[in-house]
Image: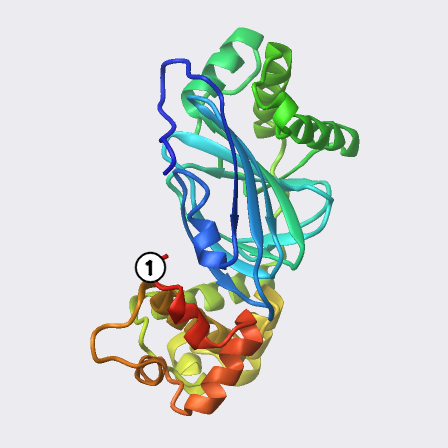
Amino acid sequence: MHSEIQPGKDAAPDWCVLEATDADLHAHNLRNWQQQYDQLSGGGFYGRIDELALSQLQIFHEYTSQALKQQCNVWPDSVWIGFSADGRDCRINGEQVAAEQLMVRPGDTEFQLLTPQQFDIYGIVVSREVLQRVADTTQLDWHGDRPAQVRVGWSRERLQALRYAMQRLLTPTHAGLSGHLQQDWLLGAVVDILQQPQVADDKPALARRRQVVARVQAYLQAQPLATPSVTDLCELTHVSRRTLQYCFEQVLGLSPLQYLRLMRLNAVRRLLLVGLEEGDTIAQLAARYGFWHAGQFSADYKGLFGEPPSATLARAGQ
């Protein structure tokens, strides 16, 4: 059980490594975040988080083996900065993040990440109080305003230096943050990043396509047992089948049918990990999510998660 990060008083550094073989269970291993992960690529999942926490500072390295859709929400009164550990692209809120860009989100604000297979990401979360104190001390121009940036650019050299610092801080021999200069440099870098100009949004056509996808996602979140057809989604979003296809392929890299199938399979998996209600069966649970052919459901499930649904159920409650 994690201890919570407490604002205010100094605390001894808390360093840990957590591993998981289920994407959504892995999502809950990052302390004080509210997250839900859906697996998008097929095969067994492995995830690892190396995390170092102080009273008002959290830094981590996260590795995930499979492509994921991540719904994320950082702890309140903080700012999160995330960046690829090796320069690989990902997406935040449907926007492509290039190798020399960083992602920025304020605490208590939900956002969505799409990450590829074999993905490594570094994250820094700092309380706004600490950032303001650093800015005042160093006379940097940051006034604690709610950061509007989603993507910001930084120089290649400085981003490489930041990656190197994170790598050192997240190894057992440096986990104590024994050198105050390292911590001060990291906090100063965060304040500097928050002053960088925002990367311009993508073209208006892509923004409209993101809105179409967001409307479908909001509907599915409000109606988790819904099994809409593509025609239903066209009526919901007031677009043609071709436009709906373009929207999903450009924003998520999936067709609407692929997306619906993957989200339903992930929903069934989450329930299997909790355990079935008395008198319920795997086939009945699958049918409630639109999988009426038990054999096809089992094959699809194993193809995505690398194990049959019965194996997932056997671990329920563990």
Residue 256 visible in this rendered orientation of the protein? no
Please name the residue shown 43% across and 87% down the image. Answer: 231
What residue is shown at x 62% (from left), y 44% (from top)? 121
The relative height of residue 62 versus residue 60 in the rendered view (above or below) is below
Q: Amino acid at mark 1?
A: Gly
Q: Give the quadrant of the N terminus.
A: top left
> Which residue was labeled with disc 1?
317
Q: Residue at x 69, y 52 (%)?
A: 89
Residue 271, position in %: x, y? 34, 68
* Residue 108 quadrant: top left
Query: How is the model colour-coded?
Result: rainbow
Q: Nearer the viewer, residue 112 or 168?
A: 168
Image point (52%, 14%), residue name: 134
* Outermost residue, right side: 157
Query: 207 and 89: which one is in front?
Result: 89
Taking the image as shown, residue 227 lies to the left or right of residue 71, namely left
The spot of residue 122 in percent (x, y) is 61, 38
In this rendering, the answer to whether 263 lies above or below 126 is below
